[in-house]
Image (tube, rainbow, N blue to C red):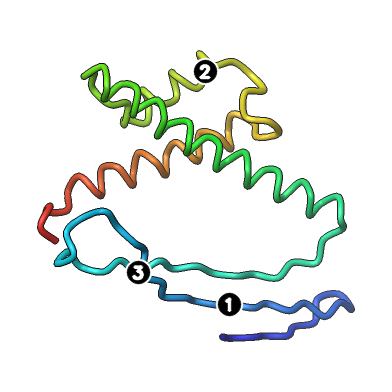
Amino acid sequence: MTRNVRRVGGWRVFVVLVVLAVVVPRRRDRAAPRVVHRTARVALRVTSGQRRRCFGLLRSAGDVWACVLEVNGWRRRRRDAPLVGYQELCRELSASGPGTFGELDSTGARSVLRRFSDAWFAAAETPQGR
């Protein structure tokens, strides 16, 4: 764990960085390699209202990711091609209408969709035996 204390305009700002290595359980073969989950923790000085809003936005971003997974699950059961391209995902987002994901605006939702698309293509490039 790393901790830095800095002065910014008379305020003492604490920055805490924690990196954890956690084994994520799988339903795959036991001989499959272990997975490392990396996290970072950053302490921010915010008001209680700002804190609520930050966590609300984080939950909404998780809802976007979960929604894309669920939609692709439906498409897989129907034997349709998955929605993985950024432009395809953005078209689906615009079709869903404004306010679908709580406080998250379309720019924030598009950022999540970009990360989902990048993660999908990165996973697709990885050999299955690795």
Quadrant of the rendered image containing residue 15: bottom right
Residue type beneath disc 3 = Val
Residue 8 lies, in percent from the top left, at 80, 76
Q: Which residue is mark 3?
A: 36
Residue at (26, 16) in percent of width and height? 78
Mark sitting on residue 128 = none
Real-space CA distance between mark 3 and mark 1, rounded to the nearest whole angstrom: 17 Å
Number of residue marks = 3
Label whose residue precedes the other's in the sequence (3 or 1): 1
Residue count near mark 1 (Cα–Cα under 10 Å), binned few <14, some 14–19, many ≥20: some
Q: Which residue is mark 2?
A: 94
Q: Residue at x 63, y 44 (%)?
A: 59
Q: Residues within 10 Å of mark 2 (few under 14, many from 20)?
A: few
> Is residue 109 or residue 75 the one in the foreground?
75
Residue under pointer 1? 17
First along the sequence among labels 3 and 2 = 3
